[in-house]
Image: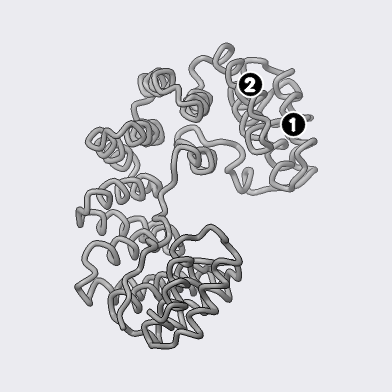
Amino acid sequence: MKLSLTWSRCIQSGGTLGLLALALWGCQPDNTPSSLDRSTMDGTDSTSHFESLILGNPRAPQPYVERATWHIRQGRITEGLRDLDLALEADSTYGEAWSTKADILYLTQAFEPCIEHLEVCLRLAPDHTPCMLRRAEMHIHLRQYAEAFDQLNSALRLNPLLHEAYWMKGMIYREQGNADNAKSSFQTAVEVNPNFFDGWIALGLAYAAESDTMAVSYYSTAIELNPRSVEARYNLAYFLQEFSPTKDEYLHRAMALYEDIREIDPDNATAPFNQGYIQLEYLANYDSALVFFTQAIEALPYYHQAFFNRGLAWESMDQPNEAELDYREALRIQPDYTPAALALERVLRGG
């Protein structure tokens, strides 16, 4: 007995504007890197090194910023903020100190002080593009799109090679439902910086939303840039799974990509879940579906959708008692989960 699933697969990766900061704060424009992203400082990384720099030029702000970022990488937030204050005492117009401090305030969820510091940065160092980008992002979070565009366009007038500015404009266009402008902005971002991973992901998502096979190329480029990216592999696998589920070649490639994800991230639950879905819904391999849904449950014991879909596999194999147990477990975890309630009602009345 083949049953039709009533629950869609796990949401495709790609993020919303609510998650924009997590991506933006981790990748800075190549020409104005955030100190927080530097892994080394001139090949050295020690207390004596930074003290030597500071003693050699105590009125220069940069050594304090470098020591601050070193502290932050070691988890010493208080010491890092103290050094940034010293940098600003040395030069209150030093944009990198303001933007780095804004980074830290954001990461510690001090959002209002973060905005205040960005405003000061833009007043004292009006040409500091990292502060412009960060301020634009905060406008985006507040859905102040006109203000965000103003900041981004100002930054691009100073430096037309700020790939993140184009990417952020694309994110706004996407949020506004302007798919063509979004794709154009993302395309410009990767033309400016062909190594911009998030730009390729955004392009993939934009074309996947239109069921355009160009998404495959964009996701594949992202994988080449970051071979251990779960996000890129998941997006590609999901697209192949959804684009043409009647073609075995696409489904088998999706299965292989999900297997790659499990090798990269053994605790991943969505990969075996989607493998189970392919086996259940498209290939009618119910025994295999049971195995994959069980693996998803082992990785995430409160995965109510996995219990429900495993119940469907049991029911498809004419095992109503086992199906009933899984439907009940799905409802125990998520009492208002309607698909499981309907399925349970079905097996209790004997189909």
Question: Residue 262 at x, y = what percent?
Answer: 48, 73
The C terminus lies in quadrant: bottom left
Q: Secondary structure at mark 2?
A: helix
Q: Nearer the viewer, residue 103 or 142?
A: 142
Amino acid type at image mark 2: His
| Local crowd size for mark 2, using a 10 Å CA cut-off: few (<14), some (14–19), many (≥20) | many
Label 1 SS: helix
Residue, disc 1:
81
Q: Are marks 2 and 1 in contact (CB under 8 Å)?
A: no
* 232 shown above or below 260: above
Q: Residue 135: x, y in percent? A: 52, 24
Which residue lies at the image location 53% right of the left edge and 57% below the top edge? 336
Instruction: Find residue 264 and report its horizontal and vertical position in percent.
Output: 50, 70
- Between 84 and 211, which is closer to the camera in this rendering? 211
- Look at the picture and state if 261 lies above or below 291: above
Indicate whether 205 appears above or below 305: above
Determine the CA span between mark 2 and mark 1.
Answer: 12 Å
Q: Residue at x 37, y 31 (%)?
A: 172
The residue wearing badge 2 is 117
Q: Closer to us: mark 2 or mark 1?
A: 2
Residue 207 vertical position relative to residue 88 in the rendered view, above or below: below
Residue in the foreground of this view, choosing between 40 and 264: 264
Q: Farthest residue toward the top?
A: 123
